[in-house]
Image: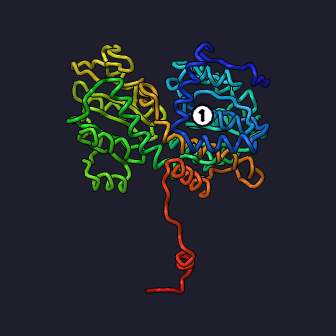
C-alpha cells in the first residue's frame, strides 16, 4: 500500500503550525548556506518527482532542510529519529506545507516504529537517516521496496557504524553517503554543536553548576572533544575515558585526566556518554558512583547507558525534575538519569545551534542531489562525502559570514604539482 503524501500525517496538533513557522524562520536566519541551496534548488529542480523518506530529528533546523529539498522538487515523508526530539509545532508546520509527517514528541516505541513504516509506505527512492533505523527496517522488514531506492544519506556516527557493518556483511543493498564523515560535519557539528548543546541540555534539566565538578566524558571522538572542551570552559575538572590509545593520548596531551571508567565512577559528579556503543556505563560503574551522581547520554541511542542494570539496582525511583529520574539504591545513594538516557541535548534542550546544523544539512541536501545525479554509477556501499561538496559547503559558509581567504598563485600551484623543484 502507498500513502497519499498530500493527506497522510500523524502529528500532535495541527493548530501548532503557525508557531512552528515562526520558529523555523528564526532558525533560518542562522542557516545561510541552506538558504543559498534552497534558492538554487528552487530554480533548478534537481529532485523533481523524487520520493524522499527521512528519519531525522524533527526540529527547526531539520525543517529548513526539508523546505530546501521540497523546493528542489522532492516529495517528502518524514518521521522522527528519536521519540523525545520532535518539536510538535515544527511537525505541524511541515505537515501544513504539504509534507507527510509522522512524529509526536514522547511517542512510545510501538508508535516510533509505526511511523517508520508509514514513511516506508510512501516507497521512498532516497532515504535520509539519523541513526540508520529507517535503513535497518527497510532491509529487514520491507526489502521488497529496495529495488526502487536510488540511494541514501546518513547523518550520525552511530548510523555510519551500523551501515559499515551492513556493508561488511554484504547486507547493504544500495549506496549511502556518510554525511557524518564530512569535515564540515564532524569538525563543527559534532565538536561545537554537540559540545554546546549537551551542556545546555544538562544544565536545563538539572540547573547544576558545572564549575568545580568532576565531569566524566566517555569517549573522545569529535563529540567527546566538544563536550570536554565546553565543560572545561565552564570550570569543570574533566576526566576522559577511552578504549582507543591514540584518542586517550590526545586527551591526555590536551590536559585532561585519563583513566578507566570504573575508577572515574568513584569520583565523577556528572557523566556523559558519547561513544556510539552500548552498555558503556553499566552495573559496576553504578555501584561505584557517589551519592548525587548525574548520568546523561549524548550518543545517538540510549543503549550507551545500561538502564536495565540501573533499574535492577534501585529500590525505588521517582522523577525529581522534568527529565531527571532519581534511582535510590539499597545503600542509600541517589543516582540521577537524565532524559531517559536519550540524547540529552534534544530531550531537555533544543539540539544543536542552527549555525552548525547549517553545514550538516547543506551536506545532506547536496549529497541527495549527488545521489540522484550519479545513481547509475554508484555501488552498493558506504561512500564518503565528495571532497568538492565538502569544500563547497565551507566556501558558502565563509561567504555567508563575510570572510575572505587567500588563493594560490599560479606559481604556487605549479610548485605544489611539481616534484622537480627541491630546496
Quadrant location, the N terminus: top right
**Residue drawn at x 33%, y 41% as measured from the top left:** 230
**Residue drawn at x 54%, y 78% as measured from the top left:** 411
Q: Nearer the viewer, residue 281 or 99?
A: 99
Q: Nearer the viewer, residue 395 or 228?
A: 395
Examine the rendering and report whether any part of residue 173 can be seen: no
Residue 115 position, x and y percent, is 64, 23
Q: Is residue 258 above or below residue 140?
A: below
Examine the rendering and report whether any part of residue 52 can be seen: yes
Q: Nearer the viewer, residue 311 or 38?
A: 38
Q: Most extreme residue toward the front, as rendered?
A: 402
Left or right: 265 in relation to 422: left
Q: Look at mark 1 in the image and give the residue it sits on.
A: 64
Q: Circle 1 — which element?
A: helix
Q: How many other residues sit within 10 Å of disc 1, few (<14), some (14-19) or many (≥20)? A: many
Left or right: 194 in relation to 40: left
Left or right: 89 in relation to 350: right
Residue 400 position, x and y percent, is 53, 47
Residue 130 position, x and y percent, is 56, 36
Amino acid at each position: 500500500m502507498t500513502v497519499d503524501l498530500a493527506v497522510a500525517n500523524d502529528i500532535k496538533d495541527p493548530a501548532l503550525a503557525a508557531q512552528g513557522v515562526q520558529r523555523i524562520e528564526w532558525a533560518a536566519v542562522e542557516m545561510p548556506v541552506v538558504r543559498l541551496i534552497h534558492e538554487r534548488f528552487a530554480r533548478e529542480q534537481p529532485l523533481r518527482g523524487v520520493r524522499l523518506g527521512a528519519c531525522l530529528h524533527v526540529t527547526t533546523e531539520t525543517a529548513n532542510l526539508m523546505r530546501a529539498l521540497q523546493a528542489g522538487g522532492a516529495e517528502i515523508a518524514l518521521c522522527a529519529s528519536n521519540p523525545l526530539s520532535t518539536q510538535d509545532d515544527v511537525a505541524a508546520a511541515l505537515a501544513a506545507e504539504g509534507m507527510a509527517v509522522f512524529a509526536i514528541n514522547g511517542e512510545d516505541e510501538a508508535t516510533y516504529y509505526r511511523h517508520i513504516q508509514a514513511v516506508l509506505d510512501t516507497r521512498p527512492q532516497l532515504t535520509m537517516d539519523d541513526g540508520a533505523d529507517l535503513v535497518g527496517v527497510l532491509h529487514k522488514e520491507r526489502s521488497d521496496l529496495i529495488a526502487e531506492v536510488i540511494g541514501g544519506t546518513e547523518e550520525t556516527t552511530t548510523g555510519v557504524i551500523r551501515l559499515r557493518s551492513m556493508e561488511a556483511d554484504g547486507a547493504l543493498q544500495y549506496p549511502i553517503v556518510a554525511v557524518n564523515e564530512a569535515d564540515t560535519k564532524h569538525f563543527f557539528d559534532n565538536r561545537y554543536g554537540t559540545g554546546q548543546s549537551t551542556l545546555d541540555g544538562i544544565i536545563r534539566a538539572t540547573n547544576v553548576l558545572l564549575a568545580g565538578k568532576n565531569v566524566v566524558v566517555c569517549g573522545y571522538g569529535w563529540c567527546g572533544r566538544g563536550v570536554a572542551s565546553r565543560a572545561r570552559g565552564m570550570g569543570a575538572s574533566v576526566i576522559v575515558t577511552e578504549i582507543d590509545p591514540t584518542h586517550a593520548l590526545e586527551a591526555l596531551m590536551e590536559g585532561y585526566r585519563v583513566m578507566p571508567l570504573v575508577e572515574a565512577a568513584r569520583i565523577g559528579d556528572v557523566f556523559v556518554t558519547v561513544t556510539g556503543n552500548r552498555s558503556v556505563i553499566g552495573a559496576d560503574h553504578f555501584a561505584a558512583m557517589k551519592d548525587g551522581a548525574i548520568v546523561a547520554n549524548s550518543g545517538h541511542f540510549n543503549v550507551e547507558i545500561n538502564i536495565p542494570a540501573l533499574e535492577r539496582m534501585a529500590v525505588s525511583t521517582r522523577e525529581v525534575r522534568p527529565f531527571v529520574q532519581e534511582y535510590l539504591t539499597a545503600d542509600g545513594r541517589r543516582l540521577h538519569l537524565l532524559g531517559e538516557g536519550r540524547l540529552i541535548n534534544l530531550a531537555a534542550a533544543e539540539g544543536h545551534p542552527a549555525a552548525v546544523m547549517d553545514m550538516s544539512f547543506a551536506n545532506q541536501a547536496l549529497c541527495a542531489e549527488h545521489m540522484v545525479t550519479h545513481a547509475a554509477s554508484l555501488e552498493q556501499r558506504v561512500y564518503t562525502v565528495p571532497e568538492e561538496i565538502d569544500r563547497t559547503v565551507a566556501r558558502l559558509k565563509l561567504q555567508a559570514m563575510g570572510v575572505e581567504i587567500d588563493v594560490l598563485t599560479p606559481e604556487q600551484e605549479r610548485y605544489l604539482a611539481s616534484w622537480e623543484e627541491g630546496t
